[in-house]
Amino acid sequence: MINFNELKHLLKSPKRIVITAHSNPDGDAIGSSLALFHYLQKSDHSITMIMPTEIPKSLNWMKNFDKILVFENTKTFSRKIIKEAEMIFSLDYNALSRVEGISSLIKKSNAYKVMIDHHIGPEDFCDAVLSDTSASSTCQLIYEFIEMMGDADSLDKDILNPMYVGILTDTGGFRYATSSKLFRIVANILEKGIDNNMICDLVFNSYTINSFNLLAHCISKRIEIMEDCNTGFIALSQSDHRKFNIKRGDLEGVVNFILKIKKMRCAALITERRDIVKISMRSKGDFSVQEVCGKYFNGGGHKNASGGALKKPYKEVIKLFKDIISNEYKEALTKENTDAL
């Protein structure tokens, strides 16, 4: 970790700390924020968690979830807190553009800034950086950070429960981005008494009737399979958003259902918003959706899980996606992987 000793020294005395994570926060963003919050609380720091945009209510069972501020709804108060902060932690994002409305506040702040993240190409805006693209999740890095601090004995359920949520969600239930190192960490977490069955149930079986109906609509009405490219996508228009009153988090995991189809290696969820069209992509094996999103959709992420967005008409983005897959990546998607087993 860059400037670890300096950071460790600063944390020895109570500080006013702000914890931030990326817009449209997922399980890893929320989980890492709460895990770090509970850890730092043990040292009497004054801590505020601020998310740029709405947070998924499906995770509201986690302890102190209700203490997370949403910048969109608390702008005046959140600006004051960020302005007065002595330290700012940037979790699960590598660029200020990923925190939308609070990016300029972080950039202007004189606070000591810390990045803990696992995405490629971290920007140079923090004083201390823990960046590891081989890590499954930012929650894994929070675990490693606490160990580096010499505080492994402080890992209790308040810290480990949200940490486990982030690991579970970012690995898709241990289906990708795993490693022997991760499983050793998970073994240590379980030995601390974490209830795997309960957390898996709360994370993966949290559909409301409306979100379940939305999933059924996606699969029955809005899916298109490009069988000759081993690819499928779901496209949702603004009218779909209005019909199902789609909130942030309602579409979490929907794109993964496409990859349950035999031979599918690439999947996408394309959603029309008021002034932008977003794309979320997933893949199997060595096919990099990170490359696709970075090259064509102003985005990025991980090899098997990435996203992006374009300010273009909805139908034009759908056509662009189909043309890119058919013309640029068909060969890679249909090539037999003889080294898979």
Image: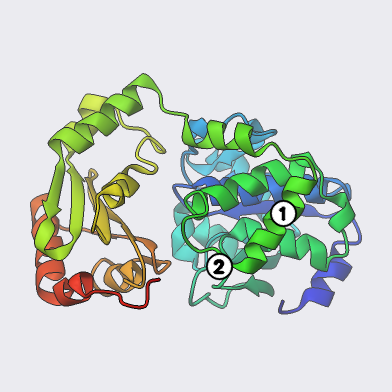
- Above or below residue 41? Residue 266 is below
Quadrant containing the C terminus is bottom left
Label 2 crowd (10 A; few <14 / some 14-19 / many >=20): many
**Three-letter amino acid code at disc 2?**
His
Q: Residue, x 56% and y 72% (percent of image)? A: 134
Which quadrant would residue 86 be assigned to in this image?
bottom right
Q: Position of residue 88 (x, y in %)?
A: 68, 59
Percent of width and height locating residue 119:
50, 69
- Residue 338 x %, y %: 31, 77
Q: Is residue 27 visible?
A: yes
Nearer-the-camera pick, 234 or 341: 341
Mark 2 / mark 1, whichever is N-terminal: 2
Left or right of residue 328, residue 188 in this image: right
Checking the image for residue 325, the label placed there is none
Q: Residue 242, relative to residue 85: is it above or below? A: above
- Kind of residue at disc 1: Ala
Q: Which residue is mark 2?
A: 118
**Residue under circle 1?**
187
Q: Residue at x 85, y 62 (%)?
A: 11
- Spatial CA distance of label 2 from label 1 is 21 Å
